[in-house]
Amino acid sequence: MKTRAPWSPVHSGRSLGPISSSVLLAAVLSAGLGLSACSQSTDQEGDEATVGMGNATPAVSPALSGTPAGDALAVPSAITRIDDVVGLGEIIAVRGEKTLAMGTLADFQGDSAKVVELPSAECGDITITEDTVVIPCGTQVLLINDGEITRSIDTEMQVRAAALTSTGEVVVANHEDNKVWVHHPEADAKVDEIIADRPSTQILALPQPEGPDAVVRTWNETTTIQDIQWTKGKPGGTLRVGLGIGRMSPGEDGTLVVSDTTGDQIAIYTADRIIRLHQTAPIDDSPWAVAWDKHNHLAWAASTGTNSLVGYDISQGVPEERQRLSIPENTIFLSVLDDGSLITATKDATELRLIPNPGAGSSAK
């Protein structure tokens, strides 16, 4: 039996869905739960995570018993193996070895998704900002709209993580350097360099109700998460995430859903001013892919250790299970569209799986 990380929920008493994270943080602070300690850097803990922490990978799934939820959803024939999938709003983006397919659910159902050839097979994680797909490939970051490359940034280094802010800055990082670079949209191609705590596994830009986007990065090797104060040119605080962070996914108003794969937990963070842990709870074995369902106000987590996909209501201070589904073995990709429909895919899959709005009727009250 695996040792769980300490369970430290922070009670809000309100939903993370329709209200702003500033209200949530006010509730947290009024509860007097000592969150100031959560924003301390981990530098004093040394260069490496404690033995047995970090470098999490999804567990190999047991054989699935029964029928998984949803139906198969084909991808364009140019995608012979799915290496990444992200859905946000109405847009779905699927990356193959050197090909990207993008479009709406109707486009994929009608075999009319747009296909873009990528310059390299060495590409990182897809992110989406509104209707723009962002993908780092080799030494470039590509911004793609409606199947057309609308902006290409040459970074002069290998990049594996990139995100676009709502004001047009492109924030990039990689697996080798403890730096984050902010490429501004102006014609003079101004670039700011910020020293981060470690290299980066993922990086996300999170729109805020007011002010600039929050930027958050993770590093799986030391199971840490950090906000980047990019408008001030400096790093923010760094937090340890359980025993072994898996993936993070954006929510609303600076909210993040994060999996602790090694510790079998789901974690909710907010990052409107600084990164803060908000809630954690033990869940099914080896959670990896996570996503926020703004239609039903549920946090979803897919666990490869149990072939389960569970939706949690996080409005009561501790995540509470609302929906449970069976999913195919080794499901490691998960996204939620605007209408609450889930898009999943397994490791090395050749097709997606569509689960139409399974959270209906279980929205947070």
Image (cartoon, helix red, strand yellow):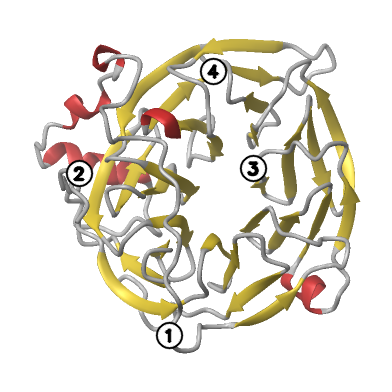
Is 293 left or right of 9, judged from the image as shown? right
- Depth order, front residue of 183/343: 343
Q: Nearer the viewer, mark 4 or mark 1?
A: 1
Task: Give the residue at the far left of this rendering.
Answer: 32
Label 3, label 2: how many angstroms apart (C-alpha)? Answer: 27 Å
Query: Mark 2 falls on what kind of element?
Result: loop
Q: Residues within 10 Å of mark 3 (few under 14, many from 20)?
A: many
Q: Give the x, y percent position of residue 325.
A: 42, 79
Q: Amino acid at mark 1?
A: Ser
Q: Label 2, label 4: how many angstroms apart (C-alpha)?
A: 33 Å
Identify residue for label 2: 5
N-term mark: 4 or 1: 1
Quickly name the residue at label 3: 125
Q: Which mark lies nearer to you, 4 or 3? A: 3
247 vs 94, left or right, is: left
| Amino acid type, mark 4 | Thr
Q: State the mark number for residue 231.
A: 4
For disc 2, the neighbor class at 10 Å (few under 14, some 14 to 19, many from 20) is some
